[in-house]
Amino acid sequence: MKSRLLTLAFAASLFAPLSYAQTAQGIVVDQGYARATVPGQTSGGAYLTLENKGKHADALLSAQSSTAQSVELHTMKMEGDVMRMREVNRIDLAAGEKVSMAPSKGYHIMLMGLKAPLKAGDKVPLTLQFEKAGKQETLLEVRDGKATADNGKHGEHHKH
């Protein structure tokens, strides 16, 4: 009986990173997902929530994924009637601050040079590099979105 419980506990721990927030050195990464893409789309967006539960400021410096040739941190905002997207060098996280990435506002992560289309239900590995907390691995679920062929042509309809 005891070995059965241990086996069940071990099996459950294998799936924990897919469904629960992950914490490294006070940084909680939660609600991560990437948008599904269409054939021929060369880039995709990823979104997550970062919360600094530590007592000191930290910053997300970069990200990497085996699903893309490169990964960039971006911000977007409306300037007049034009949506402008820009790559940023870092996303600062003050102590106690939460940053929620979402489509069409604030920060997001761009997966550039996708090696294959992102299909709903797939998992995208993502390594986040924080200034103080170091590296943190996470898995993003690919969700259906409003992905269109234009989304993959990042910047053609938006100004950087």
Image (cartoon, grey):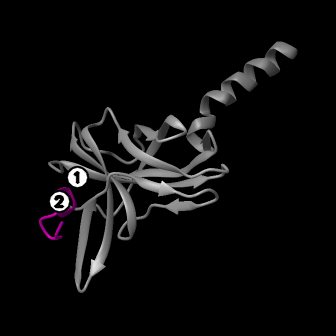
In-front residue for pair 54/84: 54
Identify the mark nearer the N-term, 1 or 2: 1
Residue type, numbered disc 2: Ala
| 17 shown above or below 54 | above
Is residue 144 located in the magenta-colored stretch of the structure? no
Q: Which residue is mark 2?
A: 149
Q: Position of residue 22 (x, y in %)?
A: 60, 41
Q: Secondary structure at mark 1?
A: loop
Q: Which residue is mark 1?
A: 38
Residue 77: image quadrant is bottom left
Please provide the residue range marked out in magenta. 150-160
Please state if 4 lies on the left or on the right of 37 as rendered: right
In-front residue for pair 66/78: 78
Is residue 47 visible from the viewing direction of this image? no
Residue type, numbered disc 1: Val
Q: Residue at x 67, y 29 (%)?
A: 13
Most extreme residue toward the right is 1
Q: Residues within 10 Å of mark 2 (few under 14, many from 20)?
A: few
Q: Residue at x 75, y 25 (%)?
A: 9
Is residue 123 visible from the viewing direction of this image? yes
Q: Secondary structure at mark 2?
A: helix
| 57 shown above or below 137 | below
In-front residue for pair 111/99: 99
Q: Residue at x 44, y 48 (%)?
A: 60
| 46 shown above or below 151 | above
Q: Quadrant of the C terminus?
A: bottom left
Q: Quadrant of the N terminus?
A: top right
